[in-house]
Image (cartoon, rainbow, N blue to C red):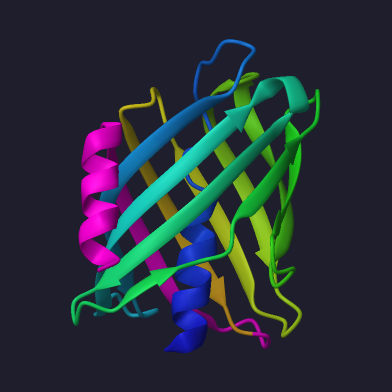
């Protein structure tokens, strides 16, 4: 289950990188739901998500941090992710703790992407195939397939979240961190 939560976090962190921004930093805040199922489609778990994304187009970077609240009320905040974007819309990403890294490609106009596909790996051989769809910044959807080192599907995550205001994010963060 711990492995599953780690990759749930990493999967979320790579969500919704597409957006239209000016050439300065921009912070996007989201609240949503993650449903994790096994390879047969049976639901394993559901979690709430708080996601903070900071877009830094002048540095060609996106920084993300995710907090999860499971159905038992356990709160987990995961290490930040740094995404480095190339001029050709390809990207590399790595968690601040170095446990997960990957690469992928955005589709659409730079900083106004509508889709991306990426593959991420961890030192223990677990692999994530990550697809994200976004047409604007108000909603994000994603699907992540997590593979065990032998290639067997461990789980599939379906993620949906909506953009929220700073006061909503701060209020929820304070409530869960008491």
Which one is in front, 90 or 95?
95
Q: Where is 46 relative to 58, above or below?
A: below
Q: Is residue 26 magenta?
A: no
Can the viewer see residue 91 in this picture? yes
Q: Position of residue 165 (x, y in %)?
A: 26, 31
Q: Where is 68 relative to 29, above or below?
A: below
Q: Position of residue 124 (x, y in %)?
A: 72, 85
Q: Is residue 155 magenta?
A: yes
The quadrant the C terminus occupies is: bottom left
Q: Where is 167 relative to 33, above or below?
A: above
Q: Residue at x 20, y 60 (%)?
A: 175
Q: Residue at x 37, y 38 (%)?
A: 29
Q: Position of residue 145 (x, y in %)?
A: 50, 66
| Magenta region | 149-178
In-image side of 81 versus 153 (left or right): right
Residue 111, by quadrant, is top right
Q: Residue at x 33, y 53 (%)?
A: 50
């Amino acid at each position: 289950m711990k492995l599953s939560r780690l990759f749930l976090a990493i999967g979320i962190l790579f969500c919704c990188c597409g957006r239209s921004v000016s050439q300065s930093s921009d912070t996007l805040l989201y609240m949503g739901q993650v449903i994790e199922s096994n390879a047969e489609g049976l639901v394993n778990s559901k979690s709430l998500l708080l996601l903070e994304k900071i877009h830094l187009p002048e540095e060609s970077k996106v920084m993300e941090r995710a907090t999860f609240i499971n159905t038992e009320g356990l709160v987990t905040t995961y290490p930040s992710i740094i995404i480095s974007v190339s001029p050709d819309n390809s990207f590399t990403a790595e968690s601040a703790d170095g446990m997960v890294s990957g690469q992928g490609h955005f589709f659409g106009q730079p900083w106004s992407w509508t889709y991306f596909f990426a593959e991420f790996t961890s030192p223990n051989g677990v692999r994530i195939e990550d697809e994200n769809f976004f047409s604007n910044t108000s909603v994000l959807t994603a699907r992540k397939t997590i593979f065990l080192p032998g290639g067997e599907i461990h789980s599939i995550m379906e993620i949906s979240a909506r953009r929220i205001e700073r006061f909503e994010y701060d209020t929820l963060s304070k409530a869960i961190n008491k």
